[in-house]
Amino acid sequence: MKSFISWIGGKNNLKKEIVSRFPKDFSNYVEVFGGAGWVLFHKEKGGKEVYNDLNSELVNLFKVVKYHPEEFIKECEFLCNSRELLDDYKENYTRKNLTDIQRASNFYMVIKYSYGSDLKTYGARTTDKLNSLEYIRKINERLSKVIIENLDFEKCIKKYDREETLFYLDPPYFNTESYYQNVEFNIEDHKRLRDTLKNIKGKFLLSYNDCEEIRELYKDFNIEEIERHNNLVARYKEKDKSYKELIIKNY
C-alpha cells in the first residue's frame, strides 16, 4: 500500500527496489528514519514492526492516525485548501495549547498543501480530500501493531538490535541535510551511524546518495549502485532524468 503523506527524501520511487533486496530470514523490522514510511507500508505486513523518527510532529501524526483515526478525520474535515489557510496551519501546529489531534491535523494539512511537502510554500495543487481522509482508515489498520518511536537513531538501533532484526535506514543524504525540516545531521552523525551499524547483531539495508564520501565510509560493506527517476523533470527541464543512489547492506 501507499503512504498517506509525502515527505522530503521519501522512497516512493524506490520502495519496490528496496523491499526486493530484503533478506528472507528476519522477524523484526525497524524503520529507523521513518519519514513518510513508504517502505514500511509497501512491505508485507508481519512480525514485529517499528516506525521511528526524530521529528516529533511526524511521530505525533502517526500516533494520532493509529490511536484516534475517527477524531483525526473529523478534525480534518473542517480544514480547507488555500494559500491563506496554509499560513494558519503552519502557525497552529506549533502552538502549545493544542491537543495532539489538533496538532496532527494542522501538520497533515501543511504536508498535503505545501509545495513538495517542504512545509513552507503553498503548492497550489488540488487533492481529493474525502478520498484522502477515507484512506486514513486503511492506514490505521496497517499501523495497528506497529510500534511508533521518537528516538535518536543510535538509541533506536541499540534498543531493537537482535539477530532476527532487519533495520532499514534512510538518513538525510550527504550534503543535502539542509533540505530536511528541523534536522541537524552533520558529518559526525554520518560517521556515528556507520560506527553504530558496524557492531550490530542484526542485518541492515541503507539507502544513500552516491558520493565519494559515503562510498569511503561504507567501503567495508556491500554497495550496490541503482538509479531512480527524477520526479522534478516535468517541472524543471534542465534537471537530469535520473539520480544514482546507493544500496548498502551487511549481508
Image (tube, rainbow, N blue to C red):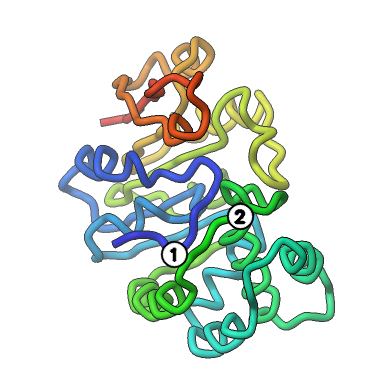
Give the secondary structure at mark 1: loop
Q: Amino acid at mark 2?
A: Ala
Q: Can residue 180 be spotted in the picture?
A: yes
Nearest the eye: 13 or 47: 13
Which mark is drawn over residue 158?
Answer: none
* Residue located beneath label 2 in the image: 124
Q: Is residue 182 above or below residue 81?
A: above
Instruction: Identify the residue at image location x=40%, y=69%.
Output: 146
Instruction: Identify the residue at image location x=72%, y=50%.
Output: 120
Nearest the eye: 26 or 1: 1
Q: Is residue 90 left or right of residue 143?
A: right
Coordinates of residue 134 in the picture (x, y in percent): 40, 80
Nearest the eye: 78 or 21: 78
Q: Can residue 158 be spotted in the picture?
A: no
Coordinates of residue 139 in the picture (x, y in percent): 38, 72
Task: Using the rendered view, name the quadrant where residue 16 is placed.
Answer: top left
Q: Label 1, label 2: how many angstroms apart (C-alpha)?
A: 19 Å
Local packing at callout 2 (Cα closer than 10 Å; few below 14, some 14-19, many 20+) is few
From the image, which quarter does the N terminus lie in?
A: bottom left
* Residue located beneath label 1 in the image: 4
Instruction: Identify the residue at image location x=41%, y=23%.
Output: 243
Q: Amino acid at mark 1?
A: Phe
Q: Is residue 244 left or right of residue 213?
A: left
Q: Is residue 106 above or below residue 193?
A: below
Give the secondary structure at mark 2: loop
Nearest the eye: 130 or 72: 130
Coordinates of residue 142 in the picture (x, y in percent): 33, 72
Instruction: Identify the residue at image location x=48%, y=47%.
Output: 157
